[in-house]
Image (cartoon, grey):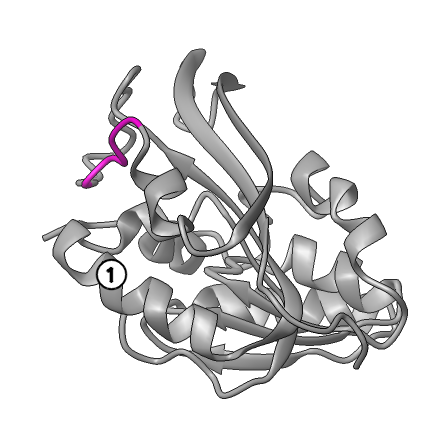
Amino acid sequence: MTHSPWAREYERTPHEYVLGTQPSEFARAMQELMPPGARVLDVGCGEGRDSVFFAERGCDVTSLDVSAAGLQKAERLARAHGVRVRWVCGDAASDVPGGPFDLVYSCGAIHYVPRDRRPDLFSRLKAVTKPGGHHAHIVFTDRRVHVEMREQIDYFTSGELLRAYADWTVLGHESGVIACAQDGTRHSHSVDQLVARKAGATGR
């Protein structure tokens, strides 16, 4: 069973954005996949920084997170930027919103889904994706582990994320290391990053 400490952090800091308000570099890199009006699902959206970024670029955004406190911050951020996002409070392992979506996106979130539930998660996410649509994920891997705030993670193993998309066209796959200081100490995490496309027409 995995455990994420971030919901507790969001509750503890109602007036502070723990992860900041600027979009991640990964979200910025997805712009070329998202024409205006594209339907985007942000899985594990946290405090909403990437969701708001997508909405500002004219996307129709639905965002899922288990933390009600995080979603309250996310809604506040969306209002400040003058955009609308559909916020859904639920567990990614069981509460995937209905699509269809042009892009399913997650940044540092789905490694909190227990390994034995991931096949079903990927199946659900693929099912709500339009033909020709894309998935983009960054996950923590077991090559370099730093435990933050007693979190418990089934870290992705080498090739696990890539194997989950053996039936799709993989447009990009990278393994690397990212710097972090979120728990007050300077450390790093090993990550896998993947962008894949579902077979079929690309038009909406």
Secondary structure mostly seen in magenta is loop
Q: Give the vertical position of 163 relative to 186 (above or below).
A: below
Residue at (49% x, 81% y) in the render? 88
Residue that sits furthest to the left in the current view: 1
User: Could you say whether the residue bearing mark 1 is in a helix, strand or loop?
Assistant: helix
Q: Residue at x 70, y 48 (%)?
A: 21
Residue 146 against residue 116 in the figure, above or below? above
Q: Could you say which quadrant of the image residue 163 lies in?
A: top left
Image-based side of 171 in relation to 92, left or right = right
Quadrant location, the C terminus: bottom right
Q: Residues within 10 Å of mark 1 (few under 14, many from 20)?
A: few
Q: Is residue 155 left or right of residue 203?
A: left
Q: Residue at x 74, y 63 (%)?
A: 52
> 78 or 201, which is in the foreground?
201
| Position of residue 53 in the picture relative to residue 196 (left or right) | right
Decide whether residue 156 is among the magenta residues.
Answer: yes
Q: Nearer the viewer, residue 53 or 190?
A: 190
Residue 136 appearing in the image: yes
Q: Position of residue 129 (x, y in %)?
A: 56, 74
Place of residue 202 in the rendered image (x, y in percent of width and height, measured from the top left): 76, 70
Number of numbered discs on residues: 1
Q: Which residue is mark 1?
A: 119
Which region is colored magenta? 154-158
Instruction: Let me know if residue 5 appears in the view.
Output: no
Q: Position of residue 34 (x, y in %)?
A: 80, 61
Amino acid type, residue under disc 1 in the picture: Pro
